[in-house]
C-alpha cells in the first residue's frame, strides 16, 4: 500500500467562476438549466436519501454525471460526503469511473458538495452476461481485477464488489463503480455494526468467522482487507460461469455460514460442463477459505488471468449459457384510447383523467444510485410525475416460476376473473356511467400465473433476524406516496419506502441501537396481479445512506389481508392501489 497523502480540503475543489443566481435546492430535484460548477443540469439520473445524480453538460458540450451530496444534514453525512470525494481523487483508470471534478454549491453559502463523474453508457455485468462467450466473460473479470489493482495500490478498498457495481461500456470494457462505501486508512470508518456495508452472499469466510468469534461484543467491527475484494470477485466469476452462487441458501433461507466457512463450493465444471478446468482453477482459488490461500493481491490475479487468456488449449468461443440470451431492450407499449360509451361514461372518464393527471409520483428515496455514472435516459428533462410503464424483461423478475404452465385455465374460471376485474374497474361509478362501464370493453391490467412458493434471497432471513433484529411475522407500514386518500399509480417494479424508523425490540450489537431500518429506507421487489388483487414480494432494502440488505417481505393491506385491492383507474401497464400498505417479515414467499 502506498503512504496516504493528507485528505484534501474543501478549498482545493471550489471551481473557478460564479455558480449562478438560482436559489439553492431543498428536497426537490434541481430544475433543468441550473448551473453548477460551470455545467448546466439537463436531467435527473437518480435520486436517493443522501444524494441526487444529474446529467449535466459543459459549455464545450461534454456530458457528465454530477452527484450532489448535502453538507448541512449533520456531521456524519458531511464527513461521508468529503470522504467519498477524497477517495475518488485517488482513482484514475479506464476500468474505474473517473471523478472529473468536485466543489461546493452554491458558491456564496455552500450547502452541497458536488462530484462530477464520466458517464458510463452500458448495462450492469449481470444484464450484459447472458449469451456471452467464455472469452468475453474472462475479459470482464480481468478488467475488474485491473481496476482493483489500481484502487488497492492507492490504498482504497471497494468493499462491495458485485455485478450491480460493474458496468460494461458500449465498447465492451468493464468499469468498477460506486466507491460510496469504500475505505482508506487515512479516513476513520463511518459505519456501525459488526460488518462494513456490503452484500452477504459476497462476504468472505474470514468476515463470517470474525462475526461468530465476536458476536455480542460491544464495539466489535470487522476490518475488511484486500482479500475481501478478491473473494467477492470470485463470487462474481463463479456466477458468470455457473449462473448460481457458490453456496446454496441455508434451510431457513439465509446465508449458509457453515458452508462458507467449512465446505468447498461445487466445482464449476460439475454445475456447467462447458466450463474448462483451467478457468475453474482460477475461480476456485479466489474462493479459498483464507486470504493467504487466494492470490497475494489483485496484481497477481490479473497476471494469472492474462496467462489464462493466452492459452490456446481452451475454446474461448464457447458460450457457458447458450440457453440464456441477452436481455432485450424494453419496447414502448402502444396505448389504445377507450371510446366513451354514453354521456355518463364520458363524464366519468374525464374526471378520472383530470385526477390522474395530478398524480404525484412516488417521492420515496431511490437508493443512492449504484449507477451514479450510468447512461442517461433518452429524454433531456426530468421524468414526468407518473412514469410511463416499461415492458418487463423476462429475466428481471426476482421470482420466476420453476416450470411452464402446462394447461390453460378453465373457461369458467377465466370468465369469473374477467367479470371480477370489470367490477373492480367500474367501482365508484353510478347510474348511466356504471351501466356503460359494465357493458364496455375494459382495459384492465393483464393477469399472470401466480408465482410458485419461493425461498427468500440468500442471506435475507439471517440478515433480518440476526443483524437487524426483526422478528418473523413482524409488520410495518410503508407507502408509495405522500398523497393520502387517493389511489396511486404503481408498476411491477415500483419501490416502497418505510414510513418512519423501523425500530426493533432487541439490542442487536450491544450498543443500545433500536433502529433496524431508518426512515425513508427504500424497498425494492416485484408486484404482480392475481385474481383481481395486487401482490408484492420485496427482496432488498436500501437505507438513505446507501447500505443495502437482502430482505424477505410480502405486502398486506391496512386491514391485514395479504395483497392489495386493484382500484378504479387501472389499465394495461397501470395498477392503481392505495398509497399506504403494510409489509410483513417472512421466511419464505408462499
Image (spheres, grey):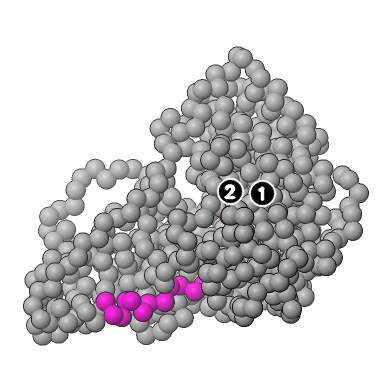
Q: Position of residue 302 (x, y in %)?
A: 73, 32
Residue 397 picture location, percent across and down: 42, 52
Q: Are marks 1 and 2 in contact (CB under 8 Å)?
A: yes
Name the foreground residue: 368 vs 22: 22
Residue 97 numbered tag: 1
Q: Which residue is mark 2?
A: 120
Task: Report the residue at 9% width, 74% height from top.
Answer: 341
Above or below, 295 relative to 380: above
Nearest to the observer: residue 378 or residue 347? 378
Q: Position of residue 64 (x, y in %)?
A: 61, 55
| Residue most extreme to the top | 313
Quadrant of the drawing holding the N terminus: top right
Q: Dot 2, how many residues are within 10 Å of its Cα: few (below 14), some (14-19), or many (20+)?
A: many
Q: What residue do we see at 75% from left, 65% from top?
A: 15
Residue 356 is left or right of residue 467, and the answer is: left
Q: Quadrant of residue 563?
A: bottom left
In the image, what residue occupies the spot 57% across and 65% down?
41
Depicted 310 relative to depicted 77: above or below? above
Q: Earlier in the sequence, mark 1 or mark 2?
A: 1
Range shown magenta: 353-372
Where is residue 390, by image quadrant?
bottom left
Q: CA distance from mark 1 to mark 2?
A: 8 Å
Q: Residues within 10 Å of mark 1 (few under 14, many from 20)?
A: many
Could you tell me which quadrant the C terminus lies in?
bottom left
The answer to if 354 sits in the magenta stretch is yes
Say which of 422 and 182 sits in front.
182
**Magenta segment includes 252:** no
Amino acid at each position: 500500500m502506498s503512504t496516504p497523502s493528507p485528505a484534501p480540503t474543501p478549498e482545493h475543489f471550489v471551481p473557478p467562476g460564479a455558480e449562478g443566481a438560482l436559489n439553492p435546492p431543498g428536497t426537490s430535484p434541481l430544475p433543468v438549466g441550473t448551473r453548477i460548477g460551470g455545467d448546466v443540469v439537463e436531467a435527473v439520473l437518480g435520486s436517493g436519501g443522501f444524494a441526487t445524480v444529474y446529467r449535466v453538460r459543459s459549455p464545450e458540450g461534454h456530458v457528465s454525471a454530477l452527484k450532489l451530496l448535502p453538507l448541512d444534514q449533520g456531521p456524519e453525512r458531511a464527513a461521508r460526503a468529503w470522504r467519498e470525494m477524497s477517495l475518488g481523487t485517488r482513482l484514475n483508470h479506464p476500468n474505474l469511473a473517473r471523478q472529473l471534478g468536485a466543489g461546493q454549491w452554491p458558491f456564496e453559502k455552500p450547502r452541497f458538495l458536488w462530484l462530477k463523474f464520466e458517464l458510463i453508457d452500458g448495462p450492469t455485468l449481470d444484464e450484459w452476461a447472458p449469451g456471452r462467450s467464455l472469452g468475453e466473460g474472462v475479459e470482464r473479470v480481468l478488467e475488474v481485477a485491473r481496476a482493483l489493482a489500481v484502487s488497492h495500490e492507492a490504498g482504497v478498498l471497494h468493499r462491495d464488489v458485485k455485478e450491480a457495481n460493474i458496468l460494461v461500456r458500449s465498447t465492451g470494457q468493464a468499469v468498477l463503480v460506486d466507491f460510496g462505501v469504500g475505505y482508506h486508512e487515512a479516513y476513520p470508518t463511518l459505519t456501525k455494526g459488526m460488518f462494513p456495508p456490503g452484500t452477504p452472499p459476497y462476504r468472505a469466510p474470514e468476515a463470517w468467522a470474525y462475526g461468530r468469534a465476536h458476536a455480542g461484543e460491544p464495539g466489535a467491527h470487522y476490518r475488511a482487507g484486500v482479500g475481501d475484494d478478491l473473494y467477492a470477485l470470485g463470487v462474481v466469476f463463479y456466477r458468470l460461469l455457473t449462473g448460481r452462487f457458490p453456496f446454496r441458501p441455508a434451510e431457513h433461507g439465509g446465508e449458509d455460514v457453515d458452508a462458507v466457512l467449512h465446505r468447498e463450493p461445487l466445482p464449476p465444471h460439475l454445475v456447467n460442463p462447458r466450463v474448462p478446468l483451467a478457468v475453474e482453477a482460477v475461480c476456485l482459488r479466489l474462493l479459498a477459505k483464507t486470504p493467504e490461500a487466494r492470490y497475494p493481491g489483485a496484481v497477481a490475479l490479473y497476471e494469472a488471468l492474462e496467462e489464462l487468456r493466452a492459452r490456446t488449449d481452451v475454446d474461448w468461443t464457447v458460450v457457458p449459457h447458450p440457453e440464456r440470451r441477452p436481455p432485450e431492450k424494453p419496447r414502448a407499449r402502444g396505448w389504445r384510447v377507450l371510446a366513451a360509451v354514453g354521456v355518463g361514461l364520458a363524464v366519468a372518464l374525464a374526471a378520472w383523467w383530470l385526477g390522474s393527471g395530478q398524480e404525484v409520483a412516488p417521492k420515496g428515496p431511490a437508493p443512492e444510485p449504484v449507477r451514479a455514472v450510468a447512461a442517461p435516459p433518452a429524454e433531456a428533462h426530468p421524468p414526468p410525475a407518473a412514469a410511463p410503464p416499461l415492458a418487463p424483461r423476462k429475466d428481471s423478475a426476482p421470482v420466476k416460476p420453476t416450470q411452464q404452465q402446462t394447461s390453460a385455465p378453465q373457461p369458467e374460471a377465466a370468465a369469473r376473473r374477467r367479470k371480477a376485474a370489470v367490477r373492480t374497474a367500474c367501482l365508484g361509478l353510478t347510474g348511466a356511467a356504471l351501466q356503460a362501464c359494465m357493458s364496455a370493453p375494459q382495459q384492465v391490467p393483464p393477469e399472470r400465473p401466480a408465482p410458485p412458493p419461493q425461498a427468500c434471497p440468500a442471506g435475507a432471513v439471517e440478515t433480518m433476524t440476526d443483524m437487524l433484529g426483526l422478528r418473523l411475522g413482524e409488520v410495518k407500514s410503508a407507502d408509495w406516496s405522500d398523497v393520502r386518500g387517493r389511489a396511486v399509480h404503481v408498476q411491477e417494479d415500483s419501490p416502497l419506502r418505510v414510513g418512519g424508523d423501523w425500530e426493533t425490540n432487541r439490542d442487536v450489537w450491544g450498543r443500545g441501537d433500536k433502529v433496524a431500518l431508518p426512515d425513508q429506507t427504500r424497498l425494492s421487489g416485484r408486484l404482480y396481479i392475481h385474481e383481481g388483487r395486487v401482490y408484492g414480494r420485496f427482496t432488498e432494502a436500501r437505507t438513505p445512506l446507501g447500505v443495502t440488505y437482502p430482505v424477505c417481505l410480502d405486502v398486506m393491506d391496512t386491514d391485514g389481508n395479504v395483497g392489495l385491492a386493484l382500484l378504479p383507474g387501472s389499465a394495461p401497464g397501470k395498477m392503481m392501489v392505495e398509497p399506504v400498505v403494510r409489509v410483513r417479515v417472512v421466511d419464505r414467499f408462499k
